[in-house]
Image (tube, rainbow, N blue to C red):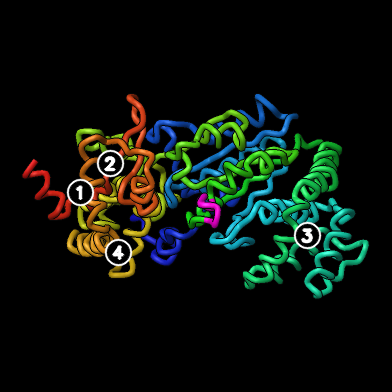
Protein backbone atom coordinates (compact mmCIF):
# COMPACT_ATOMS: atom_id res chain seq x y z
CA UNK A 1 0.00 0.00 0.00
CA UNK A 2 1.33 3.43 -0.97
CA UNK A 3 2.38 5.70 1.94
CA UNK A 4 0.42 8.95 1.85
CA UNK A 5 1.97 12.23 2.91
CA UNK A 6 0.19 13.92 5.83
CA UNK A 7 0.57 17.48 4.53
CA UNK A 8 -0.61 19.27 7.68
CA UNK A 9 1.81 17.31 9.89
CA UNK A 10 4.65 17.84 7.38
CA UNK A 11 4.01 21.60 7.38
CA UNK A 12 4.21 21.76 11.20
CA UNK A 13 7.28 19.52 11.34
CA UNK A 14 9.16 21.83 8.93
CA UNK A 15 8.62 24.99 10.99
CA UNK A 16 12.20 26.34 11.34
CA UNK A 17 11.42 28.08 14.64
CA UNK A 18 10.39 24.85 16.39
CA UNK A 19 12.90 23.12 18.68
CA UNK A 20 12.57 19.36 18.98
CA UNK A 21 11.80 18.32 22.56
CA UNK A 22 13.50 14.97 22.98
CA UNK A 23 11.29 13.96 25.90
CA UNK A 24 8.28 14.14 23.56
CA UNK A 25 7.87 10.95 21.51
CA UNK A 26 6.23 12.79 18.60
CA UNK A 27 9.26 15.12 18.36
CA UNK A 28 11.83 12.40 18.96
CA UNK A 29 10.81 10.59 15.76
CA UNK A 30 12.14 13.57 13.75
CA UNK A 31 15.56 13.63 15.41
CA UNK A 32 18.62 12.79 13.32
CA UNK A 33 21.98 12.30 15.07
CA UNK A 34 24.49 14.34 13.04
CA UNK A 35 27.45 13.92 15.43
CA UNK A 36 29.41 11.69 13.02
CA UNK A 37 29.21 14.31 10.23
CA UNK A 38 29.76 17.35 12.44
CA UNK A 39 33.17 16.05 13.46
CA UNK A 40 32.38 16.07 17.18
CA UNK A 41 30.15 14.36 19.75
CA UNK A 42 29.31 17.39 21.86
CA UNK A 43 26.28 16.04 23.72
CA UNK A 44 28.31 13.00 24.76
CA UNK A 45 31.16 15.24 25.97
CA UNK A 46 28.85 17.51 27.98
CA UNK A 47 27.08 14.50 29.48
CA UNK A 48 30.27 12.60 30.37
CA UNK A 49 31.66 15.64 32.18
CA UNK A 50 28.59 15.66 34.44
CA UNK A 51 27.83 11.94 34.80
CA UNK A 52 31.24 10.27 34.68
CA UNK A 53 33.88 12.82 35.58
CA UNK A 54 32.19 15.00 38.19
CA UNK A 55 28.73 13.78 39.30
CA UNK A 56 29.07 15.23 42.84
CA UNK A 57 31.06 18.41 42.09
CA UNK A 58 29.45 21.41 40.35
CA UNK A 59 30.57 21.88 36.74
CA UNK A 60 30.25 24.85 34.40
CA UNK A 61 30.34 24.13 30.67
CA UNK A 62 30.06 26.51 27.72
CA UNK A 63 28.34 25.72 24.43
CA UNK A 64 28.14 27.78 21.25
CA UNK A 65 27.67 27.71 17.48
CA UNK A 66 25.77 29.53 14.76
CA UNK A 67 22.24 30.55 15.69
CA UNK A 68 19.96 27.98 14.08
CA UNK A 69 22.60 25.26 13.63
CA UNK A 70 20.81 22.89 16.03
CA UNK A 71 22.12 23.81 19.50
CA UNK A 72 18.70 23.88 21.20
CA UNK A 73 17.79 20.46 19.81
CA UNK A 74 21.13 19.05 21.02
CA UNK A 75 20.57 20.60 24.46
CA UNK A 76 17.13 18.98 24.58
CA UNK A 77 18.81 15.67 23.81
CA UNK A 78 21.33 16.34 26.61
CA UNK A 79 18.42 17.02 28.99
CA UNK A 80 16.70 13.76 28.07
CA UNK A 81 19.90 11.71 28.48
CA UNK A 82 20.78 13.30 31.83
CA UNK A 83 17.26 12.58 33.09
CA UNK A 84 17.71 8.92 32.13
CA UNK A 85 20.99 9.03 34.12
CA UNK A 86 19.03 10.17 37.20
CA UNK A 87 19.55 13.95 37.23
CA UNK A 88 16.85 16.58 37.66
CA UNK A 89 17.37 18.93 34.70
CA UNK A 90 16.09 22.50 34.45
CA UNK A 91 16.25 23.65 30.82
CA UNK A 92 15.03 27.14 29.94
CA UNK A 93 15.35 29.73 27.20
CA UNK A 94 16.78 32.88 28.76
CA UNK A 95 15.12 35.03 26.07
CA UNK A 96 11.73 34.28 27.65
CA UNK A 97 12.78 35.95 30.93
CA UNK A 98 15.34 38.50 29.79
CA UNK A 99 15.79 41.30 27.27
CA UNK A 100 18.72 40.12 25.11
CA UNK A 101 19.67 43.73 24.36
CA UNK A 102 20.07 44.65 28.02
CA UNK A 103 21.21 42.00 30.51
CA UNK A 104 23.28 42.08 33.68
CA UNK A 105 24.67 39.28 35.84
CA UNK A 106 22.00 39.79 38.52
CA UNK A 107 19.32 39.22 35.85
CA UNK A 108 20.85 35.86 34.88
CA UNK A 109 21.25 34.76 38.51
CA UNK A 110 17.67 35.65 39.45
CA UNK A 111 16.41 33.98 36.29
CA UNK A 112 18.22 30.76 37.28
CA UNK A 113 16.77 30.98 40.81
CA UNK A 114 13.26 31.45 39.43
CA UNK A 115 13.44 28.66 36.87
CA UNK A 116 14.92 26.18 39.37
CA UNK A 117 12.22 27.10 41.91
CA UNK A 118 9.42 26.66 39.36
CA UNK A 119 10.81 23.28 38.29
CA UNK A 120 11.16 22.06 41.87
CA UNK A 121 7.70 23.29 42.85
CA UNK A 122 6.31 21.19 39.98
CA UNK A 123 7.66 18.03 41.67
CA UNK A 124 6.59 19.07 45.19
CA UNK A 125 9.84 20.61 46.49
CA UNK A 126 9.09 24.05 47.97
CA UNK A 127 11.85 26.64 48.41
CA UNK A 128 11.12 29.23 51.12
CA UNK A 129 12.19 32.78 50.19
CA UNK A 130 14.36 33.46 53.29
CA UNK A 131 16.95 36.08 52.26
CA UNK A 132 14.87 36.90 49.20
CA UNK A 133 11.74 37.82 51.17
CA UNK A 134 13.70 40.72 52.72
CA UNK A 135 15.33 41.57 49.38
CA UNK A 136 11.94 41.77 47.63
CA UNK A 137 10.57 44.00 50.37
CA UNK A 138 13.59 46.31 50.08
CA UNK A 139 13.25 46.44 46.27
CA UNK A 140 9.55 47.24 46.67
CA UNK A 141 10.41 50.08 49.07
CA UNK A 142 13.17 51.28 46.74
CA UNK A 143 10.80 51.34 43.76
CA UNK A 144 7.96 52.67 45.90
CA UNK A 145 5.96 49.75 44.48
CA UNK A 146 5.19 47.12 47.14
CA UNK A 147 6.00 43.53 46.15
CA UNK A 148 3.68 41.57 48.43
CA UNK A 149 4.98 38.15 49.37
CA UNK A 150 3.67 36.03 52.23
CA UNK A 151 6.13 33.98 54.29
CA UNK A 152 4.76 30.81 52.68
CA UNK A 153 4.93 32.11 49.11
CA UNK A 154 7.21 30.50 46.57
CA UNK A 155 10.50 32.15 45.69
CA UNK A 156 9.60 32.01 41.98
CA UNK A 157 6.58 34.25 42.57
CA UNK A 158 8.65 37.11 44.01
CA UNK A 159 11.22 36.99 41.20
CA UNK A 160 8.44 36.81 38.62
CA UNK A 161 6.86 39.95 40.08
CA UNK A 162 10.15 41.87 39.83
CA UNK A 163 10.76 40.58 36.30
CA UNK A 164 7.26 41.59 35.21
CA UNK A 165 7.71 45.11 36.59
CA UNK A 166 11.12 45.69 35.00
CA UNK A 167 11.10 43.77 31.69
CA UNK A 168 9.20 46.40 29.73
CA UNK A 169 10.66 49.43 31.50
CA UNK A 170 14.37 50.16 30.89
CA UNK A 171 14.24 52.94 33.49
CA UNK A 172 12.89 50.66 36.22
CA UNK A 173 15.35 47.96 35.20
CA UNK A 174 18.25 50.38 35.57
CA UNK A 175 17.04 51.43 39.01
CA UNK A 176 16.70 47.84 40.22
CA UNK A 177 20.14 46.97 38.84
CA UNK A 178 21.74 49.90 40.66
CA UNK A 179 20.22 48.50 43.82
CA UNK A 180 21.16 44.85 43.15
CA UNK A 181 24.68 45.34 41.75
CA UNK A 182 26.47 45.87 45.13
CA UNK A 183 24.51 42.87 46.47
CA UNK A 184 25.44 40.43 43.68
CA UNK A 185 27.72 38.30 45.88
CA UNK A 186 25.07 38.15 48.63
CA UNK A 187 22.42 37.15 46.06
CA UNK A 188 24.74 34.47 44.68
CA UNK A 189 25.41 33.14 48.18
CA UNK A 190 21.67 33.08 48.95
CA UNK A 191 20.89 31.26 45.68
CA UNK A 192 23.54 28.67 46.52
CA UNK A 193 22.57 28.18 50.16
CA UNK A 194 18.79 28.64 50.05
CA UNK A 195 18.00 27.24 46.60
CA UNK A 196 20.67 25.05 45.01
CA UNK A 197 22.12 23.33 48.11
CA UNK A 198 18.62 22.56 49.40
CA UNK A 199 17.48 21.43 45.96
CA UNK A 200 20.38 18.98 45.59
CA UNK A 201 19.81 17.70 49.14
CA UNK A 202 16.08 17.09 48.50
CA UNK A 203 16.71 15.50 45.11
CA UNK A 204 19.27 13.08 46.55
CA UNK A 205 16.81 12.09 49.29
CA UNK A 206 14.52 11.09 46.43
CA UNK A 207 17.25 8.93 44.91
CA UNK A 208 18.30 11.36 42.18
CA UNK A 209 21.88 12.13 41.25
CA UNK A 210 21.75 15.93 41.45
CA UNK A 211 20.71 19.11 39.65
CA UNK A 212 21.64 20.37 36.16
CA UNK A 213 20.66 23.81 34.83
CA UNK A 214 20.83 24.36 31.05
CA UNK A 215 20.52 28.03 30.05
CA UNK A 216 19.74 28.31 26.36
CA UNK A 217 19.65 31.39 24.08
CA UNK A 218 22.33 33.38 25.92
CA UNK A 219 24.20 33.09 22.59
CA UNK A 220 21.70 35.70 21.38
CA UNK A 221 22.92 38.39 23.80
CA UNK A 222 23.24 41.61 21.81
CA UNK A 223 26.79 42.59 20.79
CA UNK A 224 26.16 46.25 21.60
CA UNK A 225 29.05 48.23 23.13
CA UNK A 226 28.70 49.39 26.74
CA UNK A 227 29.87 52.72 28.17
CA UNK A 228 33.09 50.97 29.29
CA UNK A 229 33.94 50.16 25.65
CA UNK A 230 33.41 46.44 26.24
CA UNK A 231 30.73 44.61 24.31
CA UNK A 232 27.82 43.28 26.37
CA UNK A 233 28.93 39.60 25.94
CA UNK A 234 32.53 40.45 26.96
CA UNK A 235 31.25 42.17 30.09
CA UNK A 236 28.88 39.32 31.04
CA UNK A 237 30.90 36.24 30.22
CA UNK A 238 34.50 37.45 30.63
CA UNK A 239 34.50 40.32 33.12
CA UNK A 240 31.79 38.74 35.30
CA UNK A 241 32.38 35.12 34.34
CA UNK A 242 33.74 34.07 37.74
CA UNK A 243 30.44 34.99 39.40
CA UNK A 244 28.39 33.06 36.83
CA UNK A 245 30.60 30.02 37.43
CA UNK A 246 29.98 29.97 41.18
CA UNK A 247 26.48 28.45 41.04
CA UNK A 248 26.56 25.26 43.12
CA UNK A 249 25.09 22.84 40.60
CA UNK A 250 25.95 21.61 37.12
CA UNK A 251 25.44 24.48 34.66
CA UNK A 252 25.58 24.62 30.85
CA UNK A 253 25.62 28.15 29.40
CA UNK A 254 25.15 28.97 25.73
CA UNK A 255 27.43 31.87 24.77
CA UNK A 256 27.79 34.03 21.62
CA UNK A 257 29.96 32.44 18.91
CA UNK A 258 31.92 35.69 18.51
CA UNK A 259 33.57 35.15 21.92
CA UNK A 260 35.42 32.12 20.52
CA UNK A 261 37.26 34.46 18.14
CA UNK A 262 37.99 37.06 20.81
CA UNK A 263 41.59 37.70 21.86
CA UNK A 264 40.33 37.01 25.38
CA UNK A 265 39.04 33.51 24.66
CA UNK A 266 41.64 32.07 27.08
CA UNK A 267 40.40 34.42 29.81
CA UNK A 268 36.84 33.32 29.07
CA UNK A 269 37.90 29.68 29.27
CA UNK A 270 39.56 30.16 32.65
CA UNK A 271 37.05 32.48 34.32
CA UNK A 272 33.76 30.99 33.20
CA UNK A 273 34.72 27.59 31.83
CA UNK A 274 36.99 26.59 34.71
CA UNK A 275 39.86 25.99 32.29
CA UNK A 276 37.73 23.98 29.84
CA UNK A 277 37.34 25.38 26.30
CA UNK A 278 33.80 26.11 25.06
CA UNK A 279 32.20 23.39 22.93
CA UNK A 280 31.41 24.62 19.41
CA UNK A 281 28.67 22.96 17.33
CA UNK A 282 29.75 23.21 13.66
CA UNK A 283 27.58 22.77 10.57
CA UNK A 284 26.66 19.38 9.19
CA UNK A 285 29.49 18.61 6.78
CA UNK A 286 27.79 18.48 3.36
CA UNK A 287 30.75 19.69 1.29
CA UNK A 288 34.47 19.07 1.39
CA UNK A 289 37.22 21.66 1.26
CA UNK A 290 37.47 21.27 -2.53
CA UNK A 291 33.74 22.03 -2.90
CA UNK A 292 32.64 18.46 -3.69
CA UNK A 293 29.79 16.74 -1.86
CA UNK A 294 30.47 14.97 1.41
CA UNK A 295 28.15 12.02 0.88
CA UNK A 296 27.67 10.91 4.55
CA UNK A 297 26.48 14.42 5.44
CA UNK A 298 24.26 14.66 2.37
CA UNK A 299 22.68 11.28 3.22
CA UNK A 300 21.76 12.42 6.74
CA UNK A 301 20.31 15.72 5.51
CA UNK A 302 18.16 13.79 3.05
CA UNK A 303 16.98 11.71 6.00
CA UNK A 304 16.14 14.87 7.97
CA UNK A 305 13.78 16.00 5.19
CA UNK A 306 12.29 12.55 4.64
CA UNK A 307 11.80 11.97 8.38
CA UNK A 308 9.76 15.18 8.61
CA UNK A 309 7.51 13.87 5.84
CA UNK A 310 7.35 10.17 6.76
CA UNK A 311 8.42 9.72 10.41
CA UNK A 312 6.71 6.32 10.72
CA UNK A 313 8.48 4.85 7.66
CA UNK A 314 11.76 2.94 8.30
CA UNK A 315 14.97 4.72 7.21
CA UNK A 316 15.76 2.38 4.34
CA UNK A 317 12.26 2.66 2.87
CA UNK A 318 12.13 6.46 2.89
CA UNK A 319 14.35 6.92 -0.16
CA UNK A 320 11.68 5.31 -2.30
CA UNK A 321 9.34 8.14 -1.28
CA UNK A 322 11.50 11.10 -2.41
CA UNK A 323 9.27 11.74 -5.44
CA UNK A 324 6.29 12.18 -3.09
CA UNK A 325 7.99 15.42 -1.93
CA UNK A 326 10.20 16.47 -4.87
CA UNK A 327 9.84 16.13 -8.63
CA UNK A 328 13.16 14.25 -8.71
CA UNK A 329 15.90 13.18 -6.25
CA UNK A 330 18.26 15.87 -7.61
CA UNK A 331 15.92 18.59 -6.31
CA UNK A 332 16.27 17.23 -2.77
CA UNK A 333 20.06 17.15 -3.22
CA UNK A 334 19.99 20.76 -4.41
CA UNK A 335 18.12 21.75 -1.23
CA UNK A 336 20.65 19.93 0.97
CA UNK A 337 23.66 21.48 -0.79
CA UNK A 338 22.41 25.07 -0.79
CA UNK A 339 21.56 24.90 2.94
CA UNK A 340 25.29 24.58 3.67
CA UNK A 341 24.50 22.03 6.38
CA UNK A 342 22.74 24.70 8.47
CA UNK A 343 19.65 22.97 9.88
CA UNK A 344 17.43 26.03 10.25
CA UNK A 345 18.38 27.23 6.75
CA UNK A 346 17.36 23.88 5.30
CA UNK A 347 14.03 23.85 7.17
CA UNK A 348 13.43 27.51 6.29
CA UNK A 349 13.90 26.82 2.57
CA UNK A 350 11.67 23.74 2.80
CA UNK A 351 9.00 25.72 4.67
CA UNK A 352 9.09 28.41 1.97
CA UNK A 353 8.54 25.72 -0.67
CA UNK A 354 5.50 24.52 1.30
CA UNK A 355 4.16 28.08 1.40
CA UNK A 356 4.37 28.25 -2.41
CA UNK A 357 2.88 24.90 -3.43
CA UNK A 358 1.93 21.41 -2.30
CA UNK A 359 4.47 18.61 -2.83
CA UNK A 360 5.96 17.30 -4.98
CA UNK A 361 8.05 20.47 -5.28
CA UNK A 362 9.38 21.37 -8.72
CA UNK A 363 12.99 22.39 -9.25
CA UNK A 364 11.71 25.76 -10.51
CA UNK A 365 9.84 26.36 -7.26
CA UNK A 366 12.92 25.52 -5.16
CA UNK A 367 15.13 27.79 -7.28
CA UNK A 368 12.69 30.68 -6.77
CA UNK A 369 12.92 30.13 -2.98
CA UNK A 370 16.73 29.96 -3.14
CA UNK A 371 16.80 33.17 -5.19
CA UNK A 372 14.76 34.98 -2.51
CA UNK A 373 17.11 33.67 0.19
CA UNK A 374 20.18 34.77 -1.81
CA UNK A 375 18.71 38.23 -2.46
CA UNK A 376 18.09 38.70 1.27
CA UNK A 377 21.71 37.80 2.00
CA UNK A 378 23.00 40.18 -0.69
CA UNK A 379 20.99 43.09 0.73
CA UNK A 380 22.76 42.66 4.08
CA UNK A 381 26.36 42.61 2.74
CA UNK A 382 28.26 45.89 2.88
CA UNK A 383 30.77 46.64 0.14
CA UNK A 384 33.87 46.32 2.34
CA UNK A 385 32.70 42.89 3.52
CA UNK A 386 33.09 41.39 0.03
CA UNK A 387 36.87 41.50 0.32
CA UNK A 388 36.67 39.64 3.63
CA UNK A 389 34.40 37.03 2.02
CA UNK A 390 36.90 36.54 -0.82
CA UNK A 391 39.64 36.01 1.79
CA UNK A 392 37.52 33.33 3.48
CA UNK A 393 37.10 31.57 0.11
CA UNK A 394 40.89 31.54 -0.41
CA UNK A 395 42.08 30.81 3.14
CA UNK A 396 39.11 28.77 4.46
CA UNK A 397 39.72 30.42 7.82
CA UNK A 398 38.59 33.51 9.72
CA UNK A 399 40.48 35.91 11.95
CA UNK A 400 39.54 37.31 15.35
CA UNK A 401 38.66 40.81 14.18
CA UNK A 402 35.11 42.03 14.69
CA UNK A 403 34.59 42.28 10.91
CA UNK A 404 34.98 38.51 10.58
CA UNK A 405 32.72 37.95 13.59
CA UNK A 406 30.00 39.86 11.75
CA UNK A 407 30.34 37.50 8.78
CA UNK A 408 29.69 34.58 11.13
CA UNK A 409 26.80 36.27 12.96
CA UNK A 410 25.15 37.20 9.67
CA UNK A 411 25.54 33.62 8.42
CA UNK A 412 27.54 34.68 5.38
CA UNK A 413 30.22 32.21 6.55
CA UNK A 414 29.80 28.71 8.03
CA UNK A 415 32.13 26.63 10.18
CA UNK A 416 32.88 22.96 9.50
CA UNK A 417 35.02 20.20 11.00
CA UNK A 418 36.79 17.37 9.19
CA UNK A 419 39.74 15.08 10.04
CA UNK A 420 42.13 17.97 9.35
CA UNK A 421 40.35 20.23 11.85
CA UNK A 422 38.27 23.40 11.67
CA UNK A 423 37.62 25.20 8.38
CA UNK A 424 35.25 27.87 7.06
CA UNK A 425 33.35 28.38 3.83
CA UNK A 426 30.98 31.05 2.58
CA UNK A 427 27.28 30.26 2.31
CA UNK A 428 26.67 28.14 -0.82
CA UNK A 429 23.91 30.58 -1.82
CA UNK A 430 26.49 33.40 -1.84
CA UNK A 431 29.05 31.27 -3.68
CA UNK A 432 26.65 31.23 -6.66
CA UNK A 433 26.28 35.01 -6.92
CA UNK A 434 27.54 36.81 -10.02
CA UNK A 435 29.93 38.84 -7.87
CA UNK A 436 31.70 35.76 -6.46
CA UNK A 437 31.71 33.91 -9.78
CA UNK A 438 33.18 36.95 -11.58
CA UNK A 439 35.86 37.33 -8.89
CA UNK A 440 36.79 33.64 -9.19
CA UNK A 441 37.16 33.94 -12.98
CA UNK A 442 39.50 36.91 -12.56
CA UNK A 443 41.51 35.03 -9.93
Mark seen at residue 353:
4
Relative to 116, residue 375 above or below: below
Relative to 203, residue 27 above or below: below
- Asked if residue 376 lies left or right of residue 400, the reply is left
Report the quarter where the C terminus lies. Answer: top left
Question: Contact, CB < 8 Å: mark 4 with mark 1?
Answer: no
* Occupied quadrant, residue 84: top right
User: Magenta span has 227?
Assistant: yes
Question: Contact, CB < 8 Å: mark 2 with mark 4?
Answer: no
**Sequence-first disc among 1 and 2:** 2
Disc 3 to disc 2, how far (Cα)? Answer: 45 Å
Q: Does dot 3 land on a helix, a strand or a loop?
A: helix
On the image, the x and y values in percent for residue 167 come to 65, 68
User: Magenta span has 214?
Assistant: no
Residue that carries the numbered disc 2 in the rendered image: 425
**Can residue 217 be seen in this snapshot?**
no
* Occupied quadrant, residue 251: top right
On the image, the x and y values in percent for residue 202 come to 85, 42
Q: Does dot 2 land on a helix, a strand or a loop?
A: strand
Mark seen at residue 431:
1
Question: Which of these two is toward me, 76 or 313?
Answer: 76
Residue at 56% of width from left, 44% of height from top? 75
Residue at 81% of width from left, 75% of height from top? 144
**Sequence-first disc among 2 and 4:** 4
Question: Contact, CB < 8 Å: mark 3 with mark 1?
Answer: no
Question: Contact, CB < 8 Å: mark 1 with mark 2?
Answer: yes
**Can residue 96 be seen in this snapshot?**
yes
Disc 3 to disc 1, how far (Cα)? Answer: 50 Å
Relative to 168, residue 273 above or below: above
Amino acid sequence: MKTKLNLSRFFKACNPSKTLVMGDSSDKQYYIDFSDVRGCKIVEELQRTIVRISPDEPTCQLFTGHIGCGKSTELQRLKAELEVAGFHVVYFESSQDLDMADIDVSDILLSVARQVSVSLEAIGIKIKPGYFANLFKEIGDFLQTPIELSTQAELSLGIAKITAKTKDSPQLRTQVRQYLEPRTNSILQAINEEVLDKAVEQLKLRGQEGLVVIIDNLDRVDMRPLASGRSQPEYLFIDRGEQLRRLKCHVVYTIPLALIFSSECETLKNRLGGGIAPKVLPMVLVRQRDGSDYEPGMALLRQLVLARAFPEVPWSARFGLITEIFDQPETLDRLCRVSGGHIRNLLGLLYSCLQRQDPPFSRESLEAVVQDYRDDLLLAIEEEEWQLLYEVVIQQSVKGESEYQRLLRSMFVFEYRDPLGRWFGISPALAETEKVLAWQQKK
